[in-house]
Each structure stands twice: as C-alpha cells, then as structure tokens.
DNA sequence: ATAATTAATCGTAATATTGCAATGCATTAT
DNA sequence: ATAATGCATTGCAATATTACGATTAATTAT
C-alpha cells in the first residue's frame, strides 16, 4: 500500500491536505519565509542560506510550485520565485475555516 | 537518505512542520472534523464512517495523539478522543503568524 | 469463567519522501 | 564560438508513510 485512498474523502479534504503537505516541511517553511521577507523574489540565494544542496532546494521549490503555492519566472540566467497570492489566500481561507470550527469551550476527556 | 535534516532549521520551523504534517492527510482531517462536530468524543464510530480499516484508523489516531493534537481517555471498553485545546491554539497562533506574514500587495513575478 | 467487544500493536507490502552527486540545458559573458 | 553561471532533471540510496490482516490486551456482558 503506501498509497493514500483519496477517493473516499471529499475534494475539500483532499485539497487542504495537499496544500498542507506542501508546506509541512521545515525546509519549505524556511523557503517560504525567505521569499516573504525579501518580497522581491530570490532563487539561488536559498542554496547559500539554507544548508541544503542545490538539487534538494530545487526539488523543494518544484513541490511548492506544483502545489501552486509559489510561482517562478525566468529572469535572465536565474529564476525568480514569489508567492502565488491566489493559493495563499485559498490556504488561509480553508485553513481558517477548519481551525476556526473548533471552539475549545467544553473539553470532554 | 529520506531523513529530514531538522538540525539545520529553527525550533519553530521544525515544530510547525511537525504539527502541519500531522494534519496533512485527508483521513486525519476527516477524523478531526468528526471529533469537532460531535464535540462529545468518539472512537470506533470513525471506523464505520470513514472507509478505512480499524488498524488504519487507530494508526492515524496515534499520530494525532503523538503530535499532541488530540488526547484520548479510556471510557470503559471504548476510547474517547477529543481535541487538545492547547496544541490547537498553538497551531492557530503559529500558523496565523506564518500565513499572516505575507501581505500580497506587490507580487513580483 | 467464558464470550463478546473495542482498540492497540505487530508484521508486512507497496508507495512516497528526502537528500545528493552527476548530468543536462539554457542564458549570459568573453 | 567558448566558457561560465544558474537551475532543472536524472538516478540512486536511505528512510518514512500508508494501509491492512492477524493478533493481543483489556474491559464488559453472560
């Protein structure tokens, strides 16, 4: 097995879990934080700053791009990445609804 | 390898990614939603409602418990699970800070 | 005491993820 | 044209995840 049975869940559950999985890695969180701070895009800077090999960074960037969380455009010889505002908002909304649905007044156990 | 190099990231980055990973699965999202709806705790109900085997559900519950997101107490022959308010709040705060740090005014690419 | 019920755990198979060296592919500089 | 630079892709090894049948452990009912 090792294969998630996504067909038994709702589209919303699958979509949210996909987005969450994309950001559920310290390297990808670090990458996103770095992109957000220097709002102006970056790329190979990450390789120098995080302690990971270039191939590894590139792979993490690809995952974030595939999930639609970031977008990249070729800028001469380097590539410029930035947040995809649409997906970011979607994540905020979906996650806000999910987390906000719990009102922790009455804990039972 | 297949082993995350967590030593090169901050505690906050590691903690947030651990929490996110715990909820980044459609089954675990479904479980949490079910727990939240029937605020009163459940357990084996999940096995009937989600289309997963008992062993699988139990494993997902264990992961959520290990991450501190839910807590369970033995209630006679069955086990009662509910949200751990403390961790839930921590997740909301950490995630809110992270997602909120992006102000999507100026997209660059 | 025995049976039934509930859930955790073990063992196993299939698949996914993480990380990197090596290589390939553009684009810019010489 | 050639070299250099920046990134993506490929191939590979190690580890993690997902799922489930079978078993076990504990509690309740008979």
Image: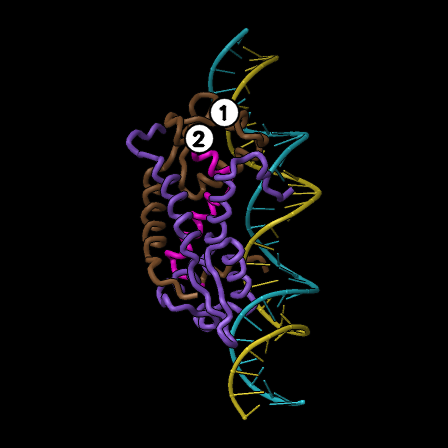
Chain colours: A purple, B brown, C yellow, D cyan
Q: Position of residue B21 (x, y in %)?
A: 47, 48
Q: Position of residue C13 (x, y in %)?
A: 71, 43
Q: Of helix, strand and loop, which mostly describes the magenta segment?
A: helix
Tag count in the figure?
2
Give the answer, above or below, for where A30 lies relative to D29.
Answer: below
How many C-alpha atoms fall within 10 Å of the one at disc 1: few (<14), some, or many (≥20)? few
Q: Position of residue A23 (x, y in %)?
A: 46, 53
Give the answer, above or below, for where C4 lies relative to A98.
Answer: above
Q: CA distance from mark 2 to mark 1?
A: 10 Å
Q: Residue B80 bears which disc, if any?
A: none
B12 in magenta: yes
Identify the residue position indicated by label 1 in the image.
B45
User: Secondary structure beneath disc 1?
Assistant: helix
Q: Quadrant of the N terminus of chain A?
A: top right
Q: Position of residue A48 (x, y in %)?
A: 46, 73
Tell whether label 1 touches label 2 (CB within 8 Å).
Answer: yes
Looking at the image, which residue is at 39% across and 39% down? A98
Looking at the image, which residue is at 36% across and 37% down? B84
Q: Nearer the viewer, mark 2 or mark 1?
A: 2
Q: Which residues are magenta?
A: B8-34
Identify the residue position indicated by label 2 in the image.
B34
Q: Chain of mark 1?
A: B
How many C-alpha atoms fall within 10 Å of the one at disc 2: few (<14), some, or many (≥20)? some
Looking at the image, which residue is at 46% across and 59% down? A70
Foreground of the two, A59 or D28: A59
User: Both on one chain, marks 2 and 1?
Assistant: yes
Give the answer, above or below, for where B107 lies relative to A106.
Answer: below
Q: Quadrant of residue B66?
A: top left
N-terminal of the pair, mark 2 or mark 1, is 2
Q: Chain of mark 2?
A: B
């Amino acid at each position: 097995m090792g294969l998630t049975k996504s067909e038994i869940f709702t589209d919303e559950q699958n979509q949210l879990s996909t987005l969450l999985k994309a950001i559920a890695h310290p390297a990808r969180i670090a990458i996103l934080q770095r992109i957000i701070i220097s709002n102006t895009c970056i790329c190979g800077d990450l390789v120098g700053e995080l302690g990971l090999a270039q191939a590894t960074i590139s792979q993490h960037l690809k995952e974030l791009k595939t999930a639609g969380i970031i977008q990249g455009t070729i800028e001469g010889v380097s590539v410029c990445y930035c947040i995809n505002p649409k997906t970011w908002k979607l994540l905020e909304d979906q996650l806000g609804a999910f987390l906000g649905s719990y009102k922790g007044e009455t804990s039972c156990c």
